Image (cartoon, rainbow, N blue to C red):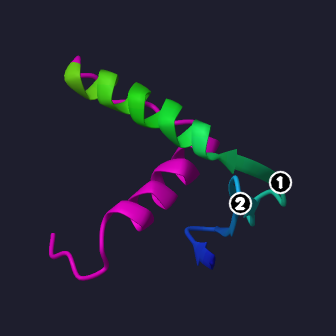
Amino acid sequence: MNRQLNGFTATQTNKGFHVINHDNSEEFEISLNDFNEFANKYAQDTIEGKNPELSDKEEIIFSIWEMVLIPNTAIH
């Protein structure tokens, strides 16, 4: 799967995603473990009533996470 969203392209790999950030031409890998760590941190911050401040990488992880978890037929 290859998706272009919000200024980046994420290509699914066997271990997660290969990401190209179009804003700064940075390329990096996001592993399934990165998703787990992000989800735990995000959940903990939410439980504590914090408004999480996300790094650029975390914003991309969040976007991919939403894409994977929220079906495109959902009405917000």
Residue furthest out toward the bottom: 73
Disc assigned to residue 14: 2
Nearer to us: label 2 or label 1: 2
Can you say whether 34 is above or below 29 in the image? above
Picture quarter containing residue 11?
bottom right
Q: Is residue 56 above or below residue 10?
A: above
Q: Which residues are magenta?
A: 48-76
Question: Mark 2 touching mark 1, by CB under 8 A?
Answer: no
Question: What is the quadrant of residue 68 in the picture?
Answer: bottom left
On whether residue 54 falls in the magenta region, the answer is yes
Identify the image quadrant of the N terminus.
bottom right
Amino acid carrying mark 2 in the image: Asn
Q: Residue 38 in the image: x percent, y percent?
A: 49, 35
In which quarter of the view is residue 52 placed? top left
Residue at point 31% right, 30% down?
43
Q: Secondary structure at mark 1?
A: loop
What amino acid does circle 1 point to? Answer: Glu
